[in-house]
Amino acid sequence: MNHHQATAAGGEPAAGPDDIAALHDVDYSIDGKVIFRGIRIGIRRGDVTAIMGPSGTGKTTLLRLLTGQLRADAGRVVVDGLDVARLGRRELYALRRRMGMLFQNGALLTDLDVFENVAFPLREHARLPERIVRNLVLTKLHAVGLRGAAHLQPQQLSGGMGRRVALARAIVMDPQILLYDEPFAGLDPISMGVVMRLIRSLNDALGISSIVVTHDVREISQIADMSYILSDGQVVASGTPRELHDHPSPIVHQFMEGLADGPVSFHYPAPDLREQLLDRTGAT
Amino acid sequence: MGLLADLLANARGFLERVGAMTRFFGQLLWLSPGALLRFRLIVEQIYNAGALSLVIIMTCGLFVGMVLGLQGHDLLQRFGSEDSLGTGAALALLKELGPVITALLFAGRAGTALASELGLMRATDQLSAMEIMAVDPMRRVVVPRFLGGAISMPLLTAVFIMVGLFGVQLVGVQLLGVDQGQFWSQMRGAVELDDIREGLIKGVVFGIACSLIAVYEGYNAQPTAEGVGRATTRTVVISAVVTLVLDYILTALML
Amino acid sequence: MRQSRAIDVSTGLFVLLGFAAILFLVTQITNREFSLRSDSYRLQAQFENVGGLKAGAPVSMAGVTIGRVESIGYDMSLFKAVATLRIDARYDQIPNDSDASILTAGLLGGQYIGITPGGSDESFKDGDRVEFVQDAIVLENLISKYLFSQAGNKDTAGDNAPAAQE
């Protein structure tokens, strides 16, 4: 199923023609701090693609580059054949209508109930008869298992439920690409299982492509077709979960196994312990 | 020299903010005509900023009027002109107390509500989510709030003044025995349409200013809990200062 | 949707209240005179001294306001102040020998023009000039008049000549 090969640490596969989205040699810095340097990622159509890495490697920034909320300093960000940076406002908004995004905290609108939240994109973009809106909303809520919660307020939902409603909202316009920002963060095991299952089944049932940014290795490994591991603004490894599991690179290994120490050091840089305790270095 | 450097940095920061807020204001004005088409949203915001502020405005208006009656009567009595209580109170309320106090109360109640709502939306990624759903948060959320506030303020000012006059009358006529006929006729003789116009213009200008500050601070709040809190505090402080400065400028222009 | 209907009603009430307040202010606390511009005619009056009279001051007869001072100018050839009065068209039967005096409202109040009717059968028409005028009483002149008259009494003690007139 996979045409990309796992590579040794530091190499990246070239983006293929089947890609629905890709980053070509993208640089991005903010406030002088370099987030990405010449990064190359290809998202294959129809895949669930995972973007993983230690905290702070800019995984969320990547999603924002794909949606056009941030602009790359160099390189090209291509989505569905379009160079995102070149799009005018109207075209960008048209592209965004074909994408859906699930935020870490759901980002439901607090002054609307569940039903209205899911209906929101429909109401804003299409003038549909109320009956059709109702059917669409209830169908999507059913797909995530929350049809009965249609009249609750967002404040009344648990974290997992809120996220599922946000997912229903993200798919209500039948997007081609779904972006997930840390979908498993802070969930109990049951909810995590539910979300995992939904990501995979929606991807296959709706024929879409999913990009999941996460650091929950165990969960995503069960459903991803292809994974990228980022570190220091570069792709350090990519491949199927199986391939990454057997990967020789020490940082990939530390990440996949969740080891406390390795290339990402346990200790924050500090003077020698003995010296400091004996008060010889002059540091505090 | 550190102090000087700090001052210069502050001045530069201040200029930046003024510039940013002006640009923001320009965007709001540009989008306003379009937003009026989504009347529903504006109605909700007029409710949010105006109707919900009525109680506090009317209560404070009543008491300000009553105090004005007490103080005014005491003051005028020293010159034997208690009959002019109506005139003095009406002019004070119309031209100064009404618009200014209403603006300060508005900033405290409605301004903070607007700022914290927008700040919260910013902090919980709701604004970002809207952008990704291809809905412009400025049009959908910010401009209606701005217009709701700007429309509510002059109306609240008028209500404040009306209730205030009632308060003056309550204390002056019912309590302290000023002649009712004199009270109203002296007022009618001295108050011009121009004075009312002045008060309402102030109400409109203050409304635009306070609403602008509130939505700006909220929209640009840092997306954290402290950020929202700070935005709310700033809204009140900046609104108060700007209102009083504008008050002087408008008064000077209109006199 | 019940919630939104309640909001609509409340907002409507609020807006109505606001406009009612404005209406109240406009009608109840100002003079019911609106602009006299529509139905009015002009009269002119020339004064040696207008004192503290300002444009916009009322013109009244028997204490009732019948018009306003529209403007006050200075005529270089006549060396007099010229006041233009706008009189409400309802009062179109003012005898054309009436006199216009500059009076003061109360002890320290603003100045206004009071018209005392004469006996003529003809009335003022638009553009007429008021012949008989009385200037504003300027306090300094009054005082010096008094001082002069006192001085006159002292100097011409025993003399029956009347005090020098200004």
Image: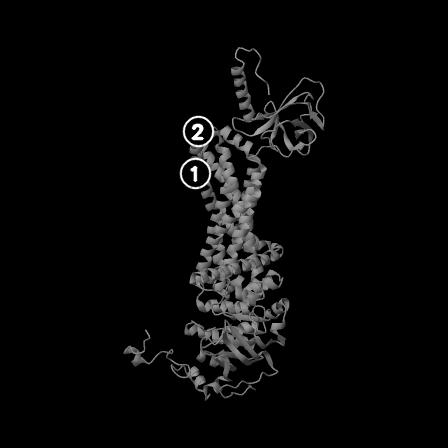
| Label 2: how many Cα within 10 Å (few below 14, some 14–19, many 20+) | some
The residue lying toward the viewer, choosing from C148 and A50, is C148
* Chain of residue at mark 2: B
Q: Position of residue B212 (x, y in %)?
A: 54, 54
Question: In the orientation shown, which residue stands out farthest toward the left?
Answer: A278
From the viewer's perspective, tell me whether residue A226 is left or right of residue A274. Answer: right
Q: Is residue B151 above or below residue C25?
A: below
The residue lying toward the viewer, choosing from A197 and C146, is C146
Amino acid type assigned to the residue bearing label 2 in the image:
Gly
What residue sits right under mark 1 in the picture?
A: B67
Quadrant (top left/top right/bottom left/bottom right) for the C terminus of chain A: bottom left
Helix, strand, or loop for circle 2?
Answer: loop
Q: Earlier in the sequence, mark 2 or mark 1?
A: 1
The residue lying toward the viewer, choosing from A273 and A12, is A273
Quadrant (top left/top right/bottom left/bottom right) for the N terminus of chain A: bottom right
Mark 2 and mark 1: Cα distance apart in space: 15 Å
Q: Which mark is residue B177?
A: 2
Type of colouring: one colour
